Image (spheres, rainbow, N blue to C red):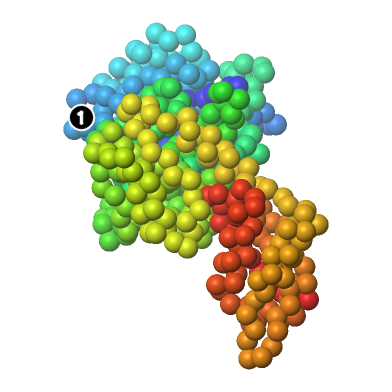
Amino acid sequence: MSLVAIVGRPNVGKSTLFNRLVGQRQAIVDSTAGTTRDRHYGKTDWNGREFSVIDTGGYSVNSEDIFEDEIRRQVLLAIDEADVILFLVEVTTGVTDLDMMMADILRRSSKKVILVCNKVDNYDLIYSSHEFYSLGLGDPFCISSMSGSGTGDLMDEILKALPEDCTAEYAEDLPRITIVGRPNVGKSSLTNALLGEERNIVTSIAGTTRDSIHTRYNKFGMDFYLVDTAGMRKKGKVTEDLEFYSVMRSIRAIENSDVCILMLDASQGIESQDLNIHNLIVRNRKGCVIVVNKWDLIDKGNNTMKEWREFLSKKLAPFDDIPVIFTSVINKQRIMEVLQTALRVYESRRRRISTSELNDYILPIIEETPPPSTKGKYIRIKYATQLPTPTPQFAFFVNLPQYVKEPYRRFIENKIREHWDFSGVPMQIYFRQK
């Protein structure tokens, strides 16, 4: 698989170019230096050939950004990983010491480097781009990633530089497992522990992750996309524009996922924001696994886990059929169980039950416990079927659907859950006129 990495100092327009090449607004763009921190992957194609693009954080030295060292490490990892490197410089500022420093690193790497001069918004600025020859990286390509001028020629040049067998590795039909939760519960640490590499930047500062970071996981016979998201705080606490976009990305990641791993902090218990995130998962009809992290910080008795499970099921009622796993990511305790459970929930979410099998099981139960009569009218359920929807939804055909009450709907749902494993999967049951 061929990879193209975009590198450069902060605020030269790397994320804008990334979004332009990928054709969608995947990376957050802001005038604040250091907006992008983690490596960000996307897929693009040009003239029928596909390849992947990596956006990186701005390479800086001696800045006030506390994430500087981590960002620099992520940039070097991206350079190491890529087949072609787009070195982005900015025409209005000219050559800076940081550009010289990066050019020095890139000249030493054996990778093909394309020098891209950004923010060339008119013809007069092209003359200013000549000073970049001093970087010793060949002809600068003049583009404007904002308006898109010059990006076509750049794409042609990238294709020439890429190895022949270039395809982008992005399988659409793989399960998407998204890790969500409040800030600082250990989402990025869990991602790194599962991948066995420092894929995402981890610090004790809330809000370190800003974008939703996709990574393909292909080990131990499991193959899926793992998505790490930014922590979601209450709306009232979100003051920065940047954090607002991060939370929007996290919500979109939930909408695009199959299963969500909701992480809680054992030392803080379950808070109202955790319940809000859980409601968001249920409303979007996604599978859910609850991971209680930092379990090593808890004083445990004989029944601590059992008490926690009962407490969680009370809090999450009526949707209390959710697998709960207690982990300590730092000690790598039970982290593989998280993945196995998430994949089991994914399979349950796709489960199909044939109409005959469903009716053979459920009709005798309905006969034994029919819906209570309302206003002297008897309710008769004739038969049931599973609807051809992406998530488990069942239709029951009834003579008087308007008289079937919520408690009976829940009774039917519980009976179906008892017989088939739908643990962690929201279920819809409809009563329809025969």
For residue 126, above or below residue 178: above
Label 1 secondary element: loop
Q: Is residue 102 visible?
A: yes
Q: Is residue 6 visible?
A: no
Residue 113 x, y percent position in the rendering: 47, 17
Q: Residue furthest bottom?
A: 375
For residue 115, which quarter of the picture? top left
For residue 204, above or below residue 307: above
> Would residue 235 appear left or right of 28 to someone viewing this image?
left
| Front position in the image: 246 or 24 | 246
**Residue at x 68%, y 31% (from the top left corner):** 47
| Front position in the image: 263 or 123 | 263
Q: What residue would you read off at disc 1?
A: 63
| Front position in the image: 4 or 329 | 329
For residue 27, which quarter of the picture? top left
Badge 1 crowding class, 10 Å Cα cut-off, few under 14, some 14 to 19, many 20 or more, is few
Residue 331 x, y percent position in the rendering: 33, 26
> Would residue 221 appear left or right of 94 to someone viewing this image?
right
Q: Quadrant of the C terminus?
A: bottom right
Q: Quadrant of the N terminus?
A: top right
**Residue at x 38%, y 19% (from the top left corner):** 76
**Residue at x 39%, y 59% (from the top left corner):** 314
**Residue at x 50%, y 15% (from the top left corner):** 112
Residue 57 x, y percent position in the rendering: 36, 31
What amino acid is labelled 1 in the image? Ser
Callout count:
1
| Front position in the image: 361 or 174 | 361
Residue 31 x, y percent position in the rendering: 32, 44
